[in-house]
Image (tube, rainbow, N blue to C red):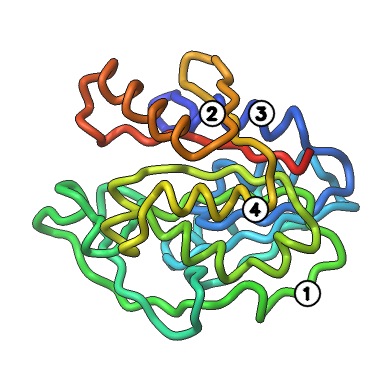
């Protein structure tokens, strides 16, 4: 952002295209607020953004940005979302606002000068009881299966739009979950999955196998060997 770039512009554009005044947004893995704050501005004072973020340094920046932009509709949950309450170890590094479990951290977060932090975990279904939930965005370095399992009651009740990062290697490393099984679990509530490609294409898939094939093709085209993630959108209709 400082260098003049945009964070996941295809995701931001899609999110703002679909949000409306008064909507309730849940941002799981809010980081410094690159998506939470534009969402808060779009939904207005009659809407709300709930930002779930475990790292204190990120929450400070998020709060400062919300204050500087006069956004009073942002609520912060200072924890990591999971399927059980307790704690989880996250690897962090001063050079980045990102974090991941040690198993899914990768070379950058594991580098010298970083640290491993113990952060609290919450089950979102236990700490939230929302009368409406219009959109959920999640990006938690492979912990998506556990975080969304802890939100299953809200997903089933409200069927919100879901925007999810999908990184099969991180999912397997962080949770031991088969990435295709995670997609099948999501498809019990949603009829299809749309991939927001970085070049602006939107690819609709109706089963887990199609998504996995698209991920493999994208990595092959980029020469990334599985390091490239996809951004997925799931709509209730």
User: For the C terminus, which image quadrant?
Assistant: top right
Q: Is residue 215 left or right of residue 149?
A: left
Q: CA distance from mark 1 to mark 3?
A: 26 Å
- The residue beneath circle 1 is 129
Q: Residue at x 37, y 36 (%)?
A: 229
What is the C-alpha distance between the residues marked 4 and 1? 22 Å
- Circles 4 and 2, Cβ within 8 Å, touching? The answer is no
Could you tell me how far apart the alpha carbons at marks 4 and 2 are, in whole angstroms? 18 Å
* Gap in angstroms between the C-alphas marked 3 and 4: 23 Å
Q: Secondary structure at mark 1?
A: loop
Q: Position of residue 149 (x, y in %)?
A: 55, 67
Provide residue 234's location: percent of width, then percent of height.
Answer: 65, 40
Residue 13 picture quarter: top right
x%, y% of residue 205? 56, 29
Residue name at image x 47 percent, y 77 percent? 121
In the rendering, which numbered label is found on residue 195?
2
Q: Which mark is residue 166?
A: none
In the displayed structure, does residue 134 sit left or right of residue 58? right
Residue underneath mark 4: 188
Screen quadrant of the N terminus: top left
Q: Which residue is mark 3?
A: 14
Whole-number angstrom distance, CA of label 1 to CA of label 2: 30 Å
Q: Quadrant of residue 222?
A: top left
């Amino acid at each position: 952002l400082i260098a003049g770039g945009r964070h996941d512009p295809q995701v931001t554009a899609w999110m703002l295209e679909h949000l409306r005044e008064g909507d309730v947004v849940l941002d799981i893995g809010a980081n410094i607020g690159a998506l939470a704050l534009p969402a808060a501005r779009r939904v207005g004072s009659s809407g709300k953004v709930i930002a779930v973020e475990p790292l204190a340094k990120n929450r400070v920046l998020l709060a400062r940005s919300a204050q500087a932009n006069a956004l009073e509709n942002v609520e912060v949950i200072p924890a990591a979302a999971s399927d059980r309450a307790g704690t989880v170890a996250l690897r962090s590094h001063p050079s980045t606002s990102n974090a991941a479990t040690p198993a899914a951290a990768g070379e950058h977060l594991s580098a010298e000068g970083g640290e491993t932090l113990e952060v609290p975990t919450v089950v979102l279904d236990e700490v939230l009881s929302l009368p409406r939930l219009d959109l959920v965005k999640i990006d938690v370095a492979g912990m998506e299966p556990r975080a969304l399992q802890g939100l299953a009651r809200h997903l089933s009740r409200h069927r919100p739009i879901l925007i999810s990062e999908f990184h099969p290697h991180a999912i397997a490393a962080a949770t031991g979950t088969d990435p295709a099984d995670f997609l099948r679990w999501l498809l019990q509530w949603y009829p299809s999955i749309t991939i927001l490609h970085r070049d602006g294409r939107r690819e609709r898939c109706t089963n887990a196998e199609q998504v996995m094939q698209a991920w493999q093709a994208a990595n092959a085209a980029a020469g990334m060997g599985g390091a490239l993630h996809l951004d997925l959108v799931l709509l209730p209709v």
